[in-house]
Image (cartoon, coloured by chain):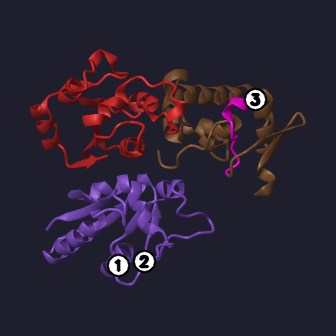
C-alpha cells in the first residue's frame, strides 16, 4: 500500500488538471492505497472560492472535489497566502465549504508522511 | 526528511510561476527537507541579473535567490542545454549553479523522493 | 482598523497597508521608526536599532522581509550567536521580532511560513 499526496497547481475551471486529479484520487483509493492530503497552490487555489457559479450542465470540479474529500476524510488544503494574493478570500469572505486554509509550512511538513507526491 | 527536487521551467516575469515556486522551495528547506532546485527551459532567464525591472510589474524575486545559502540550499543546478539553446554563457548567471546535462538530470531525478514542477 | 491606515510623523500622514505596515518603504527614516515603535510600546535602544537596521539591510539585499527563522540565522552569521537567537530577539520585540522589527524598519509584512 502506498500513501499518496496530491499537489494541484493548475486552475480549476480553466484547465483539466483538477478533473484529472479527482479521477486519479478515486483510482488510488479503489486500488487500496491511501491519500494523506490534497494541497492547492498557485492557480489551483481558485478552486477554494465560494463564489464559483456554473450552469447546471457544467461540471463543478470544485464542489466534487470537496464532496469527495469530505466523504473520504482527506484533508483538502489550500495555501492561504496564494489565495489572498488572488483576492479569493479575506477575514470576511470565507473559503468554499470543505476547503481548509493552510500554509506552505504545513504542506512541507506533511511530505514526511508521504510516499509519492503527484502533481496536477 | 525527504529529498525534494523543484524544477523551475518558467520565464521570470511573464507569470507568477517562478515566484510561487521559490516560496515553496524555501518552505520545504525551512522544515529541513533535503531540497535541490533545477533551472530548466525558459527558467534559465531567472538567473540573469535583474536588479531593477520595475516595468515588469512583478516582484523582482530572483534577487531572493541569494537566500539559498541562508536556507542551506546548496544543490542549485542549471540545465546546460537550455543555456546553449538561448545563447547564455554560464558566466552571465547571477548565482552559482552547477551545469548539468541530460544524463546528470536523469540521475538527479532518480535520487529524489519527490519532484515538483513550477 | 481605520485608525491604523495612517501614521502621523512630524505633522505628516504616511499611508499604511491594511496590516499596519508602511506602504512606501522609501518614505522611511528614523522619525518613522520612532513613531512605529511608540505605537508598539517599544522604546528603541541601541540594541533595537541594530536589529531594525539589520532587517532593513536584509530587505535591500534580498528583496524580501525576513521571517523569524532566517532572521535568526542571518544575525547569528553576521553578529554572533549571542544576538542571533530567538530569545534575544523576543526580549527586544515581544510581539514577534520578524513582525515588529520589519514594521518599525518600514518594510512589508514578512511571509507567514518561510
Which mark is drawn over residue A58?
Answer: 1
Protein chain holding label 1: A
**Does B99 appear above or below C19?**
above
Q: Is residue C59 left or right of residue C6?
A: left
Instruction: Give the structural element (helix, strand or loop) at label 2.
Output: loop
Alpha carbon of mark 3 to alpha carbon of mark 1: how far?
A: 62 Å
Residue B29 is at least partly visible in this image = yes
Q: Position of residue B38 (x, y in %)?
A: 26, 35
Residue A4: x percent and y percent?
Answer: 23, 63
Judge if badges 2 and 1 mark residues of a common chain: yes
Location of residue C50 (image quadrant): top right
Q: Which residue is mark 3?
A: C45
Colour displayed for chain C in the image of the structure: brown
Task: Name the disc covering residue B56, or none.
Answer: none
Foreground of the two, A83 or C74: A83
Between residues A10 and B100, which one lies in front from this camera angle? Answer: A10
Q: Is residue A119 left or right of residue A60?
A: left
User: Does residue A69 appear left or right of residue B114 in this picture?
Assistant: right
First to last magenta residue range: C19-27
Residue at mark 2: chain: A
The chain ID associated with circle 3 is: C
Amino acid at each position: 500500500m502506498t500513501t499518496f499526496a496530491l499537489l494541484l497547481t493548475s486552475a480549476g475551471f480553466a484547465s483539466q488538471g483538477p478533473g484529472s486529479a479527482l479521477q486519479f484520487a478515486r483510482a488510488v483509493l479503489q486500488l487500496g492505497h491511501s491519500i494523506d492530503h490534497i494541497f492547492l497552490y498557485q492557480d489551483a487555489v481558485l478552486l477554494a472560492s465560494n463564489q464559483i457559479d456554473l450552469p447546471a450542465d457544467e461540471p463543478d470540479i470544485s464542489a466534487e472535489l470537496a464532496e469527495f474529500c469530505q466523504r473520504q476524510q482527506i484533508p483538502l488544503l489550500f495555501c492561504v497566502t496564494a489565495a489572498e494574493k488572488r483576492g479569493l478570500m479575506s477575514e470576511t469572505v470565507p473559503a468554499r465549504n470543505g476547503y481548509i486554509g493552510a500554509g506552505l509550512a504545513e504542506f512541507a511538513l506533511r511530505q514526511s508522511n508521504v510516499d509519492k507526491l503527484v502533481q496536477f | 526528511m525527504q529529498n525534494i527536487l523543484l524544477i523551475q521551467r518558467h520565464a521570470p516575469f511573464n507569470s507568477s510561476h517562478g515566484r510561487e515556486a521559490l516560496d515553496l522551495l524555501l518552505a520545504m528547506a525551512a522544515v529541513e527537507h533535503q531540497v535541490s532546485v533545477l533551472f530548466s527551459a525558459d527558467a534559465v532567464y531567472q538567473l540573469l541579473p535583474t536588479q531593477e525591472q520595475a516595468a515588469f510589474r512583478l516582484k523582482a524575486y530572483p534577487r531572493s535567490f541569494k537566500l539559498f545559502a541562508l536556507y542551506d540550499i546548496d544543490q542549485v543546478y542549471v540545465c546546460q542545454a537550455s543555456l546553449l539553446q538561448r545563447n547564455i554563457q554560464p558566466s552571465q548567471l547571477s548565482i552559482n549553479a552547477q551545469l548539468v546535462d541530460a544524463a546528470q538530470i536523469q540521475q538527479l531525478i532518480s535520487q529524489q523522493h519527490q519532484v515538483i514542477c513550477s | 482598523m481605520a485608525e491604523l491606515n495612517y501614521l502621523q510623523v512630524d505633522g505628516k500622514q504616511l499611508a499604511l497597508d491594511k496590516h499596519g505596515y508602511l506602504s512606501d518603504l522609501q518614505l522611511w527614516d528614523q522619525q518613522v521608526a520612532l513613531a512605529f515603535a511608540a505605537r508598539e510600546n517599544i522604546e528603541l535602544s541601541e540594541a533595537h536599532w541594530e536589529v531594525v537596521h539589520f532587517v532593513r539591510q536584509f530587505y535591500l539585499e534580498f528583496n524580501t522581509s525576513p521571517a523569524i527563522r532566517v532572521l535568526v540565522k542571518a544575525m547569528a552569521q553576521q553578529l554572533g550567536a549571542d544576538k542571533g537567537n530567538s530569545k534575544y530577539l523576543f526580549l527586544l520585540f515581544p510581539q514577534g521580532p520578524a513582525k515588529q522589527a520589519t514594521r518599525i524598519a518600514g518594510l512589508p509584512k514578512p511571509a507567514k511560513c518561510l
